[in-house]
C-alpha cells in the first residue's frame, strides 16, 4: 500500500496539474481572509441605509415575490368566515349557471386524419366554444392553432377508418411516428378501453416505444395489477418482482411491512437480489426485536447507557450500517447469542471486516471509549507480542478519532502508525502531535524542517527541549 | 425552402457553400463575439398570456400554484401584477384548501397526482354542496392522461382547462431554460416521449421570434425527433418566422446521454461550485447564515447583471480568490478617495458613485462569504482526494485505487448521492463494472444506505449509468492479472497502452479520438486557460463541448464517423440555405446549443470560453440546469 501511495504521490507531483489544494491553509485562503477583512472594515461606512438592497422578509424571500406571498397566505389562511360562507352558498344558482363542459373524454381529434401531426386539442375543447377563443391572438400563437377545430374534424373519415378493424393500431403507429408521447398515451388509453388485454399486450410487444408509454402510464396512475399482468405477459419476471417489492415503500406499519417483505423473498429476483431481499427482511425482523427491547429498557430507566445517551430516533427501517453503529453504541459488550450484539449482526449479514471496524470505531470513539478503540486494532502474535493492525488506513482512523475530539495522547498513537511519511507529518502538524512530528523529522534526518518546527511548539515546553536535544545529538548524520 | 440533409449514410460530397463565406467557427484571428439576441420578450409574452388566461375567469379568485412553477413565475411576474386578478395565492399541496372564494384557479404542471389533488377538492366541495368555478391552467401544455384522470374522478364537467404556453424562461442573457427537470427521467429512464412536443414548440417559438436557423446539427434520438417535429410544425404553420431575418445562425441539439461523464464530474468553476454546493434554483441562490455572516438568509440573483459574479462565474475556483482580493482592494481605494474631498466633490461622490460602490460592496462580501463556505465544506468532504479519484477515472489510470476509494466512501456512509455518482463515473468510463466489483459495491451500498436502493440500482442499470460487464467483455484471466500488475504499479504510459488494448470502453476510445485528456508538459495555468479543459482543472475537456466544437468547425460530421459510431449514431446536419443566405454575418456566428436532459454550468463555462476564442456567441437552451446530484437524485427511489 505504501509503495502504491508513494508512486502515486510522485505521479501527482510530477503531473502537469498544479496541485490546487482545498485543505491547505495556504496563501489563497489567507488572501480570502484579507479581502474579507477589507470588505468588513468598510461595513460601517456603508451600512447606514440599504436603500438599494432587495427587501427581504424574515424568511429570506424577497418581499413581493410570489413564493413570499404564498407563505403569507398560508400563515393567515384559516378564515373564520369559511363555514358560514359555504352554508350560504348552498343551493345558490351560480352552481347551475356555470357552463359545464361535456364530459366526453375523446380521441376524436386524433381521427381527423390526413395531418401527419395529430392535433393537440381534445374533442371537448373543439365542441365547447370556449376552446378556441381562449387564446389571445396577440400572444403570437402560431396561426395554425386558430383553425376552427370542428371544421377540421371529419366524422365520416373517422368512422370509415374505424370500420377497417386494424385501424386502431395504425393510429398508434401514426402517433409513434409523430414523436408525441402525449398522443401516444392518449391512443393507448383508448386502446386499453376498447381492446382485450391479450390483444393489446400482443400488439405492444412488437411496438417498443408504445409499450414504454403504457408501462409509464400504468406506473403513474398506479394501476399495479394491470402493470404486473403486462410485465408477466412480456416475461419480464425481474421487473415483476421489483415492481411488487416497490410497494413496501408505501406500507407504514412495520409489522405489515415485515410480513410483506417476507412474501417478497419468493419473488423471481436474480439470485443476487434474492439474498438482498432476504437480508432486508431479516434486518427489519431484527430491528423490530431490538426496538421493542430497547424502548422497554429506556422507559424502565434501569440502563445507564440509555439514561446517559437517550435515543434520538427509532432504529426501525434504518440501513444495516446504521443498525450496526447503534448496536456498537448501545450493545457493544453483549454476547454473540443476543440479536442486538454487534458480533451477531456481523455474522448474520456477513459484514466485511473493513466495514465493521470503521463502524465500531466511529461508535466507540463517539462514546470516548478509548480502551475499546485500542482493542479494536490490537492483535497478538503467537509469541504474545502485541501489534496494531487495521483493515483501513490509519489516516482514516486518525480522522475519525479527531472528529470525535480524541485527546492528543490517543491521537498521536495512531498518527504514528500512518505509513506514508508526508501524510503522517501533515496529520501530526495539524493535530499538534509534536512527538510524532519530531521523531519523524529525526528519522528523515531533516535538520532544516526540524528546526523550522520549533516555532510550532510552545516556548520552554518539553517538546522544545526535545527538539533541541535531537538537534544537538552528534550521533545523527543530518542530510542537510 | 431549400434544405438538404446529410446523415452518416449520405456520402459527403463537397457541399455548396452559402452566400456568406464566413463559417461559424472561423479560427482566423480573434474577433469579438456578437451579442446574444434579446430574450426579454419571452418573459413579456409569457406574462401577457398568463394575465390573459386569468382574465378568462373574471372576478376575484384564488390561485393555486404548483410548487415547482413558483420560482419560474417569480422570474417573470410579481405579486402586484397578479394582484388585480388574484385574491389569494396558495401552493398546490396535499392539505385541503381552506378558502371562501367562489372561484379557484390552478396553475399546474400536467401531472396525474396534481389532477387527483384537484379532483379531491372539487369532490369535497360537491359533497358539502359548495359551488365554485374551477379552472385549470396547464403549463406548458395539457396532457390527455390528465383529462382522463379528471374524467375518471367525475369532475371533468366541473372544470375548464387552458394551456399556458410558458415554454421558455430566460435565466440570463445567454441561458434559456424550459424548467422541466422531469424530462430527464421521463425520457431517458421511462422512454416517454411526452415532452418532445414541448421541445419542438419551444424551438418553434424561437423561430417565430428570431427567424429560422440557418444550420442545424444534432446528435441523439431525442434531438433528431425534436428537430423533425419542429420541421413538421413549421411546415404546417407555413413559416411564421420564415420572413424574419435570422438572428440565430446555428442550432446544435444534443441528448444528455451522449455525454454522461461530464454531467457526473465535480464542478470546479465558480458558478458550478455554487450550484453543487448551494443549488442554484431558477437562476437564484439562497445564501444561508454561514455565507451572509448574519442570522438571515439572502436570496441572490446570479446573472450577468451582478457585476462581481459576472466576472468570476466562469473562472476556475482557484483564480477566484485573487480576483476577489484585488477587487476589494480597489473598492477600499475608491472609498479612501473621500479623504481630502471638499464639500462639492463629496456631494458628487455621494450622489454619483456611492450607490454603485455600496452595491459592489454588498456583492463582494456575499461572494467572499460563499467562497469561504465552499472552502469549509469541501475541506470537510475530502474534496482533494475525491477530485484525484475522479481524474484517475477520467484518465483510466489506477482503477483499483479509485475503486477502493469509492468503497471506503460507501463504508463510511458519506453522502449516498456522492457514492452513487462515483460508482456511475467508474462504470461509464470503464464500460461497466467487473462483475465482482459490481456485486461487492452494490452489496455495500445497500448495507450503508438502505436495501430499498435495490430499485435505484435497477434504474441505473436500465438507463446505462451503472452496469455490469457481460462475461464476454471482461478480460481473460491472464490479461487481468497483467493489467492488475501494471495498474497497481501506476506506471502511466504502460497502463494507458495496455488499457487501450484490453478494454472496449467507448468512453476511453472516444476520449482518445477526440483528445479529451490534454497531454501537456509543464503546468496548466488555470488563470490563463488554453482550452476548455480548464473547467475541470486542466484534466479533461468536456466531451459534449468538444463534439460541438468539432462539428461547428467542420460544418458537419465529416471526419467524425468513428466518433459518431462510438456515440451510437443518430447524428444529423441540415442546412437551410434560404435562411443562411438571408442571415447577417453576425447572426452566423450565433450558436444555440440545446441540451436535452440538462446542461451543467461547467459546460456553459467551457462553451463561453470557446465562443470568446473563436469569436462566436453561444446561447444555451436546456430542459433544465443540471449537475451530478440532480442526475443521481432523478434515479433514486426514495421512501414514499
Image (tube, coloured by chain):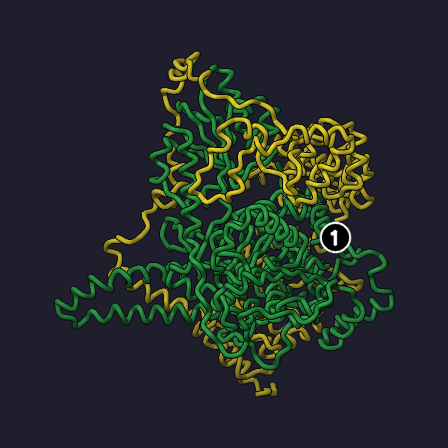
Chain colours: A yellow, B green
In the image, farthest residue toward the left: B343
Taking the image as shown, residue B116 lies to the left or right of residue B47, namely right
Q: Nearer the viewer, residue A218 or A384?
A: A218
Whether residue A407 is visible to the viewer of this picture, yes or no, is no
Residue at 49% across / 65% down in the picture? B617
Residue A284 point in image, percent of width and height:
70, 36
Q: Nearer the viewer, residue B523 or B15?
A: B15
Reply above or below: B93 against A65: above
Residue B460 point in image, percent of width and height:
70, 49
Question: Which of the 4 image quarters holds residue B579?
Answer: bottom right
Residue at 70% across / 45% down in the picture? A177
- The C terminus of chain B sits in image quarter: top right
Taking the image as shown, residue B92 lies to the left or right of residue B359, namely right
Chain assignment, label 1: A
Residue B401 point in image, percent of width and height:
70, 65
- The N terminus of chain B sits in image quarter: bottom right
Residue B464 point in image, percent of width and height:
71, 53
Q: Nearer the viewer, residue B200 or B447?
A: B200
Secondary element at tag 1? loop
Residue at 72% across / 63% down in the picture? B8
Question: Which of the 4 image quarters holds residue B308?
Answer: bottom left
Amino acid at each position: 500500500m505504501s509503495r502504491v501511495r508513494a508512486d502515486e504521490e510522485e505521479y501527482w507531483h510530477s503531473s502537469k496539474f498544479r496541485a490546487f489544494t482545498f485543505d491547505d491553509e495556504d496563501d489563497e485562503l489567507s488572501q480570502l481572509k484579507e479581502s474579507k477583512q477589507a470588505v468588513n472594515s468598510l461595513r460601517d461606512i456603508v451600512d447606514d441605509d440599504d436603500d438599494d438592497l432587495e427587501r427581504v422578509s424574515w424568511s429570506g424571500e424577497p418581499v413581493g415575490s410570489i413564493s413570499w406571498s404564498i407563505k403569507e397566505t398560508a400563515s393567515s389562511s384559516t378564515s373564520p368566515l369559511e363555514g358560514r360562507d359555504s352554508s350560504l352558498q348552498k343551493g345558490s344558482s351560480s352552481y347551475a349557471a356555470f357552463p359545464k363542459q361535456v364530459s366526453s373524454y375523446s380521441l376524436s381529434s386524433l381521427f381527423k386524419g390526413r395531418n401527419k401531426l395529430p392535433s393537440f386539442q381534445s374533442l371537448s375543447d373543439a365542441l365547447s366554444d370556449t376552446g378556441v377563443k381562449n387564446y389571445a391572438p396577440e400572444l403570437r400563437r402560431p396561426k395554425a392553432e386558430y383553425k376552427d377545430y370542428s371544421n377540421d374534424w371529419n366524422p365520416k373519415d373517422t368512422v370509415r377508418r374505424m370500420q377497417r378493424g386494424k385501424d386502431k393500431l395504425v393510429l398508434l403507429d401514426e402517433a409513434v411516428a409523430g414523436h408525441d408521447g402525449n398522443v401516444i398515451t392518449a391512443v393507448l388509453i383508448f386502446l386499453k378501453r376498447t381492446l382485450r388485454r391479450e390483444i393489446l399486450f400482443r400488439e405492444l410487444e412488437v411496438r417498443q416505444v408504445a409499450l414504454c408509454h403504457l408501462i409509464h402510464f400504468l406506473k403513474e396512475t398506479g394501476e399495479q395489477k394491470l402493470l404486473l399482468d403486462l410485465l408477466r405477459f412480456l416475461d419480464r419476471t425481474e421487473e415483476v418482482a421489483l415492481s411488487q417489492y416497490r410497494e413496501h415503500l408505501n406500507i407504514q406499519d412495520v409489522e405489515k411491512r415485515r410480513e410483506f417483505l417476507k412474501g417478497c423473498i419468493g419473488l423471481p429476483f436474480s439470485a443476487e437480489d434474492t439474498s438482498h431481499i432476504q437480508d432486508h427482511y431479516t434486518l427489519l425482523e431484527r430491528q423490530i426485536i431490538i426496538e421493542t427491547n430497547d424502548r422497554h429498557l429506556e422507559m424502565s430507566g434501569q440502563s445507564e447507557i440509555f439514561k446517559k445517551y437517550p435515543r434520538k430516533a427509532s432504529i426501525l427501517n434504518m440501513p444495516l450500517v446504521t443498525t450496526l453503529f447503534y448496536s456498537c453504541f448501545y450493545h457493544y459488550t453483549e454476547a454473540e447469542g443476543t440479536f442486538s450484539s454487534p458480533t451477531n449482526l456481523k455474522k448474520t449479514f456477513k459484514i466485511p471486516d473493513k466495514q465493521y471496524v470503521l463502524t465500531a470505531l466511529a461508535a466507540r470513539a463517539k462514546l470516548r471509549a478509548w480502551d475499546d478503540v485500542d482493542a479494536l486494532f490490537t492483535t497478538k502474535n503467537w509469541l504474545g507480542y502485541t501489534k496494531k493492525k487495521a483493515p483501513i488506513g490509519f489516516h482514516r482512523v486518525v480522522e475519525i478519532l479527531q472528529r470525535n475530539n480524541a485527546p492528543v495522547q490517543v491521537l498521536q498513537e495512531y498518527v504514528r502508525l500512518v505509513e506514508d511519511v508526508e501524510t503522517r507529518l501533515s496529520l501530526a502538524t495539524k493535530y499538534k502531535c509534536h512527538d510524532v512530528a519530531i521523531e519523524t523529522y529525526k528519522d528523515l534526518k531533516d535538520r532544516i524542517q526540524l528546526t523550522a518546527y520549533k516555532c510550532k511548539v510552545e516556548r520552554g515546553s518539553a517538546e522544545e527541549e526535545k527538539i533541541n536535544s535531537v538537534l544537538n545529538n552528534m550521533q545523527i548524520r543530518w542530510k542537510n | 425552402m431549400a434544405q438538404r440533409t446529410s446523415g452518416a449514410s449520405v456520402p459527403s460530397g463537397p457541399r455548396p457553400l452559402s452566400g456568406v463565406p464566413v463559417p461559424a467557427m472561423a479560427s482566423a484571428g480573434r474577433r469579438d463575439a456578437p451579442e446574444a439576441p434579446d430574450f426579454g420578450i419571452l418573459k413579456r409574452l409569457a406574462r401577457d398570456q398568463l394575465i390573459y388566461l386569468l382574465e378568462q375567469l373574471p372576478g376575484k379568485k384564488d390561485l393555486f400554484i404548483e410548487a415547482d412553477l413558483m420560482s419560474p413565475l417569480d422570474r417573470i411576474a410579481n405579486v402586484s401584477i397578479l394582484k388585480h386578478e388574484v385574491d389569494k395565492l396558495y401552493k398546490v399541496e396535499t392539505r385541503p384548501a381552506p378558502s371562501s372564494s367562489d372561484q379557484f384557479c390552478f396553475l399546474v404542471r400536467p401531472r396525474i397526482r396534481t389532477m387527483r389533488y384537484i379532483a379531491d377538492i372539487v369532490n369535497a366541495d360537491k359533497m358539502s354542496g359548495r359551488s365554485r368555478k374551477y379552472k385549470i391552467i396547464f403549463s406548458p401544455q395539457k396532457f390527455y392522461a390528465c383529462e382522463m384522470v379528471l374524467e375518471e374522478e367525475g369532475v371533468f364537467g366541473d372544470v375548464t382547462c387552458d394551456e399556458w404556453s410558458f415554454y421558455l424562461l430566460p435565466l440570463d442573457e445567454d441561458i434559456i431554460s424550459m424548467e422541466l427537470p422531469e424530462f430527464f427521467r421521463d425520457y431517458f429512464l421511462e422512454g416517454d416521449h411526452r415532452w418532445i412536443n414541448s421541445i419542438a414548440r419551444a424551438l418553434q417559438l424561437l423561430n417565430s421570434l428570431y427567424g429560422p436557423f440557418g444550420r442545424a446539427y444534432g446528435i441523439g434520438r431525442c434531438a433528431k425527433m425534436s428537430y423533425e417535429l419542429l420541421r413538421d410544425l413549421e411546415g404546417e404553420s407555413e413559416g411564421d418566422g420564415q420572413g424574419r431575418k435570422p438572428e440565430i445562425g446555428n442550432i446544435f441539439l444534443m441528448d444528455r446521454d451522449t455525454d454522461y461523464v461530464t454531467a457526473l464530474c465535480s464542478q470546479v468553476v465558480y458558478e458550478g461550485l455554487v450550484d453543487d454546493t448551494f443549488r442554484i434554483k431558477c437562476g437564484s441562490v439562497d445564501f444561508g447564515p454561514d455565507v451572509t455572516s448574519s442570522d438571515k438568509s439572502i436570496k441572490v440573483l446570479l446573472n450577468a447583471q451582478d457585476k462581481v459574479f459576472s466576472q468570476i462565474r466562469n473562472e476556475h475556483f482557484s483564480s477566484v480568490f485573487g480576483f476577489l482580493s484585488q477587487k476589494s482592494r480597489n473598492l477600499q481605494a475608491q472609498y479612501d478617495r473621500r479623504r481630502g474631498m471638499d464639500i462639492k466633490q463629496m456631494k458628487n461622490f455621494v450622489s454619483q458613485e456611492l450607490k454603485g460602490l455600496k452595491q459592489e460592496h454588498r456583492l463582494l462580501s456575499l461572494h467572499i462569504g460563499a467562497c469561504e463556505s465552499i472552502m469549509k465544506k469541501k475541506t470537510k468532504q475530502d474534496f482533494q482526494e475525491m477530485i484525484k479519484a475522479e481524474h484517475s477515472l477520467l484518465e483510466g489510470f489506477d482503477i483499483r485505487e479509485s475503486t477502493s476509494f469509492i468503497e471506503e466512501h460507501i463504508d463510511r456512509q458519506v453522502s449516498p448521492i456522492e457514492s452513487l455518482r462515483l460508482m456511475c463515473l467508474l462504470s461509464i468510463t470503464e464500460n461497466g463494472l467487473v462483475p465482482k466489483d459490481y456485486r461487492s459495491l452494490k452489496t455495500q451500498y445497500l448495507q450503508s444506505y438502505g436495501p430499498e436502493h435495490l430499485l435505484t440500482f435497477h434504474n441505473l442499470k436500465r438507463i446505462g449509468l451503472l452496469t455490469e460487464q457481460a462475461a464476454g467483455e471482461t478480460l481473460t484471466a491472464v490479461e487481468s492479472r497483467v493489467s492488475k500488475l501494471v495498474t497497481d504499479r501506476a506506471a502511466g504510459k504502460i497502463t494507458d497502452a495496455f488499457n487501450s488494448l484490453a478494454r472496449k470502453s467507448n468512453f476511453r476510445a472516444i476520449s482518445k479520438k477526440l483528445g479529451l485528456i490534454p497531454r501537456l508538459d509543464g503546468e496548466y495555468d488555470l488563470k490563463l486557460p488554453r482550452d476548455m479543459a480548464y473547467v475541470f482543472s486542466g484534466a479533461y475537456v468536456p466531451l459534449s463541448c468538444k463534439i460541438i466544437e468539432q462539428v461547428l468547425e467542420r460544418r458537419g460530421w465529416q471526419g467524425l464517423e468513428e466518433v459518431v459510431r462510438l456515440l451510437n449514431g443518430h447524428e444529423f446536419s441540415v442546412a437551410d440555405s434560404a435562411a443562411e443566405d438571408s442571415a447577417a454575418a453576425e447572426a452566423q456566428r450565433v450558436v444555440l446549443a440545446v441540451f436535452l436532459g440538462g446542461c451543467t454550468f461547467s459546460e456553459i463555462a467551457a462553451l463561453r470560453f470557446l465562443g470568446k476564442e473563436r469569436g462566436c456567441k453561444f446561447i444555451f437552451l436546456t430542459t433544465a440546469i443540471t449537475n451530478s446530484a440532480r442526475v443521481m437524485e432523478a434515479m433514486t427511489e426514495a421512501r414514499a
